[in-house]
Image (tube, grey):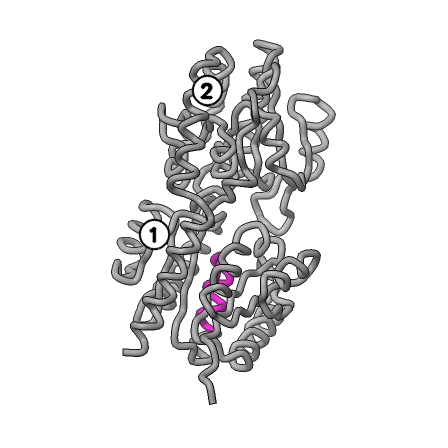
Amino acid sequence: MAERPRRILFFIPEDWYVCSHRLPLVRAAKAEGFDVVVVTRVRDHAAPIVEAGAELVPIRLRRGFHGLRDEAAGLRELVRIYRRVRPDIVHHVTPKSVIYGSLAARLARVPCRVNALAGLGFVYTATGRRAALRRVAVSTLFRLLLGGRGTRLIVQNGDDLSFFRDEIGVSAETIAVIRGAGVDTEAFAPAAREPEPPLRVCLVARLLGDKGVREAVAAARVLRERRDDVRLLLVGRNDPVNPASIADDELAAWRADGIVELTGHVEDVPALLRTCHAALLPSYREGLPKSLLEAAACGLPVIATDVPGCREICRDGVNGLLIPPRDVDGIVAAVERLADDRELRHRLGAASRRLAVDDFSEALVAERTVALYRELLGEVSR
């Protein structure tokens, strides 16, 4: 009897995130010869996952915390799935799936575990006593669950590598730096020519406080008082599950004031980016922001905060302008500099495109991740 193919299970909490960030990796694992299973909360994006060749397994477990009874039931459901599927390797994405998936993998005796953390999220950017207690709890779980034989932790930047090695105590030998999910450099390509004025600056992100959205709106208010040739677009929706989400009434007030253009969710992001002159992300911390990658691939100069993740993509004076976090005046100055210097916009934008193609293509990221799977499976078979 022929030996069955190696089986990989991806546990990613939401189907939309599978499609927006990890579908190329699903395809790459399938092309490598893996049986691929995707465990996710199925809502509106089942078809692309199945079309990529994966077996889709719905799960009721949701993002956020929904009470001890619901969380315990979700963990039991996950353990049952792992025991039934019997994967050779599991790949977890996001902090909650890393914690729950690692627990389930241990209980189901899965030989290989890959945990990918795209930044540290609200738990590590929030302030206050309650946030500090959450950080202690999450850090303790990370310390217990990450590292060891048959495991790899994927982080997206050197700052996060240092954090998990020095603060959490994960062995450097089990940490790999793979920069983000990559970008489709064919779909995200520059416009044939720069759009006409006014200068359009887009902030593409979930509308969360820790993405620097409020600082961006405050900067737009200052810019409106100074000049009439700049427009700021907020592209995306709020995320009520996330504690940092901007409330609906605050968004409604911004819309009524007319300071910024709120587009909501946009299906054709490449087309939108090609109508813009620059991209902005004044986030407090990132893993490696896909929105900046997409803007760079479209040949836009980028303005971003000098924080982990953002500075991996925004190289100050090379393809963008770095600004301090939580600094409204810094946003204003950077936008005005680009608005007043067309030659600078073109030089930075051309460098953005080269960076995206040379260092961050989806194919390159998928190749490096699949190579990590092979390495890990070889390690446990010895």
- How packed mark 1 is, by other alpha carbons closer than 10 Å (few <14, some 14-19, many 20 or more), is some
Residue 287, visible in the rendered structure: yes
Q: Is residue 216 magenta?
A: no
Please tell me which residue is depicted at 62% across the width and 68% down the height of the picture.
Answer: 56
The three-letter amino acid code for the residue at tag 2 is His
- Cα–Cα span, label 1 and label 2: 31 Å
Seen in the picture, residue 161 relative to 79 is either above or below; the reply is above
Image quarter hosting the C terminus: bottom left
Return the residue at label 2. Answer: 346
> Picture quarter containing residue 142?
bottom left
Q: Is residue 378 left or right of residue 37?
A: left
Seen in the picture, residue 84 relative to 359 is either above or below; the reply is below
The percent coordinates of residue 75 (x first, y second) are 55, 72
The percent coordinates of residue 114 (x first, y second) are 41, 64
The percent coordinates of residue 3 (x first, y second) are 45, 84
Q: Main secondary structure of the magenta part?
A: helix
Q: Is residue 233 left or right of residue 302?
A: right
| Secondary structure of residue under mark 1 | strand
